[in-house]
């Protein structure tokens, strides 16, 4: 992965199972996002009626970042 300049990221689901921990974790995420310390890469934006195309993009691994469905 290093040779191709790639990285792997993840998160723990366990804290989300406890309501108090969930509140604290989400609060921290929102604070980081609001301050600009957390950057989210949007790989594609699709209208809700294009959800099938968005799913194909993900399945075919043609997306980089998050794929967002818009109402």
Image: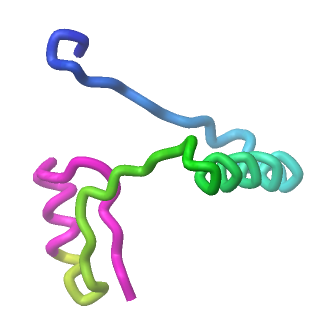
Judge from the rendering whether residue 26 lies leftward or rightward of residue 53; answer left or right.
right
Q: Split into 4 quadrants, where in the image is the N terminus?
A: top left
In the image, 50 versus 31, the foreground residue is 31
> Taking 29 as reference, is 7 above or below it?
above
Judge from the rendering whether residue 33 lies leftward or rightward of residue 58; answer left or right.
right
> Taking 11 as reference, is 2 above or below it?
above
Residue depicted at x 15% and y 48%: 61
> Taking 17 as reference, is 5 above or below it?
above
Q: Indicate the colouring scheme.
A: rainbow
In the image, 46 versus 21, the foreground residue is 46
**Residue 43 x %, y %:** 25, 57
Instruction: Please identify the quarter of the rendering in which residue 68 is found.
Output: bottom left
Instruction: Please identify the quarter of the rendering in which residue 70 is found.
Output: bottom left
Magenta-drawn stretch contains 64: yes
Instruction: Please identify the quarter of the rendering in which residue 3 is found.
Output: top left
Which segment did they paint magenta?
53-71
Magenta-drawn stretch contains 33: no
**Residue 51 x %, y %:** 25, 78
Residue depicted at x 63% and y 50%: 35
**Residue 71 x %, y %:** 39, 88
| Furthest residue in direction front, as rendered | 35
**Residue 27 x %, y %:** 76, 53
Residue depicted at x 22% and y 66%: 55
Judge from the rendering whether residue 2 lies leftward or rightward of residue 21; answer left or right.
left
């Amino acid at each position: 992965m290093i040779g191709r300049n790639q990285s792997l990221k993840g998160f723990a689901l366990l804290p989300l199972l406890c309501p108090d921990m969930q509140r604290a974790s989400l609060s921290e995420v929102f604070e980081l996002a609001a301050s600009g310390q957390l950057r989210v890469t949007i790989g594609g934006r699709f209208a809700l009626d294009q959800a099938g195309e968005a799913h194909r993009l993900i399945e075919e691994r043609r997306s980089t970042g998050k794929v967002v469905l818009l109402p």
